[in-house]
Image (tube, rainbow, N blue to C red):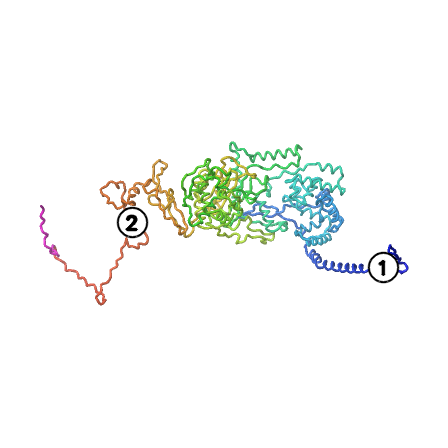
Amino acid sequence: MFGKKSKIEADSGWRGPARWKTPFYRRTWFSVLLVLLILASVAGFGAFMFFVQPLREKAETFDLGKMRNLEVASIIYDRNGGEMARIFIQNRTPVSISEVPSTLIDALTAQEDSRFFQHKGVDFVGIVRAVWLNFKAGGVTQGASTITQQLARQSFNLLERKMSRKILEAFLAARIERNFSKTEILEMYLNKIYFGAGYHGIQAAAQGYFGKDAKDLSVEESATLCGLIKSPNRLSPLKHPEASIESRNMVLGRMLEEGHISREQYIALKQKPMVTRSQSATDSQLTYIYEDVRQTVMKLVGEGRAGVGGFQIYTTIDPVLQKAAEESVRKRLAQVESQAGYQHQTYAQFKKVIDDYKAKIDAGQINPATPRPKPEYLQCAALVMDNADGSILAMVGGRDFLDSQFNRARGGTGRPVGTAFTPFVYAAAFSRPDCFPGTQLDDTPINNQRVMIGGLTGILGEWGAEAAESKWSMGPISARESLVNSRNAATVRLGEKAGLPALKDFASRAGIQSPVKDYPSSYLGASEAKLDEMCLAYSVFPNKGTRPKEMHLIHRVTDSDDKVVFQVSEDTENTVQAADPVACYQTHSCLVEALHRGTGSPAVAEFGLGPYLAGGKTGTHYEFKDLWFFGYTSAVTCGVWVGFDKQKPIYEGAFSNRIALPVWTDVVNATQKEHPAGEISPPEGADRVELCRKSGMRATDFCYEKVKDASGEIKSVRHTYYEYMRPGTNFDSYCNVHGGGDGMAPDIRAIAGFSGPDAFVPINPDSTKFAHVESVQMKGLTILGADPYQSMVPVLRAKPVEDADGTPVKRPELVDPEPAEANTAILKLPPPPKLRIE
């Protein structure tokens, strides 16, 4: 059947004549190979049916009608339900394909899918071609996915990096090609694709980058936008103009290869500068608050779902407070920059630099690829949080979102917080049973080798006291006075007593997640922290050790059908017990004094802080590089940071109570209408003890000081205050400073002798020693309430008389005597004996 045997020729070799040669298809190895191929085919078909067929079936389940659905505007509401703005989570303006220039279609297909009009969804020739071109270029210059595959991925959020996703995407792309024309596919693609900087769709990108409609885009602008698709952030013409020009020229090269432009056009277009539109800070999305909302919503509901839009976003922002915070930042920092001798770039100067930069580009005097100047002026951030649930009431991320999109209120890696960190040192120490605000501390100078801030030699400076010159009391002071006046040396000694492990533990539980360094300088705030975590941590002081579990900006999100897609959980809004209530209240009582008579006193004396209960602490980092102020009322906690993006001294003597404190004061004053301050009561069970301010010991009746009033008259004033201690605190030492009566009123000083060894010496009643003492006239009961010793109304306790056998003896009846005659004596007594006087 395989031919005649006579046609089979014999071979001969050096060994001599050979046998007849057997055909290869009759040999054993061929039969084995054939069987293996059949088995492999069967196995491959089985694998296809097992793994691929389900994906093919899944591709048939997608609703292609939803591909035309594009995002509609989402509405942002404030905490009161008022509409703040209408924004696009994905900034998009749909356009018809008829409004897209043909040069843009040419640039898109040349870059992303050169065989778009030939394939049926998956371009196998294009895959091989892309691999070859990328190999020749030594990098990725072309993708293997077709425009249709990319549309499928964007429309149905197919983002997994798995082979199964690529196969599903291919089947879905083939189905899309069967249901839509090429023109429809291009239109949907151009309206969905992301071009970076928050611009979704070709119209939004054209307006955002070049300030024109898509139909007016030039060839080089079209090439720029098409070059962005593979890496919108890295190739942004706003942030990275050099990389964007390189990407644009690569697209122009592909257009040349595909015959869409001539070589002369290619050479001319490559030389054109990158000219983008002037960004406008009046756009609703060009603010820190709206950008944070947009990013948060995308995280909460997912990027794919966010692209649908139509959300109602209920934020926790207080619009009046937000406006007040923004205005205060603008006004107060302008005042700082207007000071004589201020040597840094000002906000107004930077705006002139930008105007000059744009003018030179328009005039062709500088290369348009020259990076946009970055701001170097003084920055500020502020954050206000509700103490009850952690909701953000106001947030300022910087002075101008247009100049810098970095949100300093909630982003970054943190900055050294300086002496604003010291309340946590005191609170950690007060958590010990042997320490409280009355604990005496040594305030003599300390060697900087012990702390290592700014050097290893010399004396540790007292910059925390917010004063131009370092001063030491050279004696013991109470922990309260040390915190109120921000004494660095005394703080370090207290921190060493508490220990770094205790400090790190307290800070972590309070909400500071940034690490506290294992160095003594951490006692004075050398470790970095962020504004939002410091605000959260400070809330333990007005809350007596509790704090919100976390901060949040968005309370609820509903979709276009009013279905809730996100709701802050009750657990998130609840508070957690983070620290010892007594220690936090003791620290709070010190911070109230720090704000009114300590380092924060200019808030009341100069900046107009209202007459309500508040506490707070300044924070000046070494060399005046970062300035902070954190404070609170019973209702809110507010933090303010001032400094440069590139850390450097602001100026010598730039204390936080001159720069950050005014902003804090303005903002907290603005909270009082909707979030009024209330009282902060001490913890239940704490012991109230009166202490002498001068000795730091328990007060006696003689703890008075002489003080001149406004008229110049000298008066004796009680020189004490009340401290709350944890039950069981062993503190029984009484004041030994005022025992001699110095400073006491005359009446009090006159009886001082009664407390000494001569207390029981008889006093001559005719002495004029007490002539000046006015008598005390009784006007009522001297005892109010219970009278256990019956000192006012005695109680009769007469017992009945009994006989020997226990029988009560009856009282004899009393008989009125007969009336006596007038002038008749009832009792007749003998006359007294005569007195003899010698």
The answer to which quarter of the image holds residue 484 is top left
Quadrant containing the N terminus in the rendered view: bottom right
Q: Is residue 283 left or right of residue 682?
A: right
Residue at the image point whose x is 55% and y is 34% from the top: 344
Report the residue marked by disc 1. 22
Mark nearer the N terminus (1 vs 2): 1
Residue at the image point whose x is 13% and y is 58% from the top: 820
Amino acid type indicated by mark 1: Thr
| Percent position of residue 607, x then y | 47, 38
Camera-nearest residue between 643 and 346: 643
Q: Is residue 788 left or right of residue 354?
A: left
Camera-nearest residue between 405 and 36: 36
Report the residue marked by disc 2. 780
Residue span colored magenta: 823-838
Query: Visible in this render: residue 216?
Result: no
Quadrant containing the C terminus in the rendered view: top left
Mark 1 against mark 2, which lies toward the viewer? 1
Q: Is residue 826 magenta?
A: yes
